[in-house]
Image (cartoon, rainbow, N blue to C red):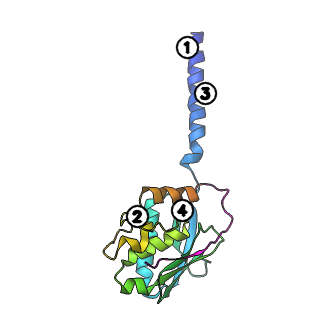
Amino acid sequence: MLRRRGAQALIGAAAISFSITLAPAAHAATTTLYYDDSQAAEFKSAVAAGAQVWNTNVTNVRLVKAPAGRRAEIKIIATNGWPQSILGPIRPGGSGTVWFGREAVNEGYNTTRIAAHELGHSLGLPDRKPGPCSSLMSGSTGGVSCTNATPNASEKAAVQSNYSSALTTTPRTGAVLTDAP
């Protein structure tokens, strides 16, 4: 009887230890980054769709349209040139810009793919050129016919990694990346 109680106590202690070990991962913090599309002109819906792509495909960072009066970490500006972005990962309190270039749209590139790609830069992903259409970060090298706006498994994993630690909250901005062919 004493052995059974001892074994039950050990099993109970192991179960508590196991649940305590798993608890932090189950409740990992989500980083929220606000974007300002007030200067995105005709591309506002594409920006919203691009943000939704990331919100659907990663779990620890959220891209949210900034409400009136709220400072945004990511500013979206429509321009006549090629799309460009500040390379992140942008952190809460930091700042980044996406220049949504009409030149790529006028050449026939998909607007949701452009938005998701440029927001990917804000989340810390560099260009992967040349690359296939299946790689969101291949950008223009995916071709005008490419409409894939979904990050592949390695792109998702890289963003998850970029926002995996509460120790990485220092605002950061990087180089400007232009997505010209």
Q: Find out whether the residues at labels 2 and 3 contact each other: C-beta distance under 8 Å.
A: no
The residue to which callout 3 is attached is 13
Q: Earlier in the sequence, mark 2 or mark 3?
A: 3
Specify the amino acid type for callout 1. Arg
Q: Nearer the viewer, mark 1 or mark 4?
A: 4
The part of the chain drawn in magenta is 165-181
Q: Find out whether the residues at labels 1 and 4 contact each other: C-beta distance under 8 Å.
A: no
Spatial CA span between label 2 and label 3: 46 Å
Can the viewer see residue 167? yes
Specify the amino acid type for callout 2. Ser
Q: Which mark is residue 135?
A: 2
For residue 116, above or below residue 11: below
The residue to which callout 1 is attached is 4
Spatial CA span between label 4 and label 3: 34 Å
Q: Earlier in the sequence, mark 1 or mark 3?
A: 1
* SS of the residue under disc 3: helix
Q: Earlier in the sequence, mark 4 or mark 3?
A: 3
Spatial CA span between label 1 and label 3: 14 Å
Does the segment drawn in magenta span residue 176?
A: yes
Give the farthest residue toward the bottom: 80
User: Residue at point 61% right, 78% down?
Assistant: 70
Q: Earlier in the sequence, mark 1 or mark 2?
A: 1
The residue to which callout 4 is attached is 61
User: Residue at point 49% right, 88% down?
Assistant: 79
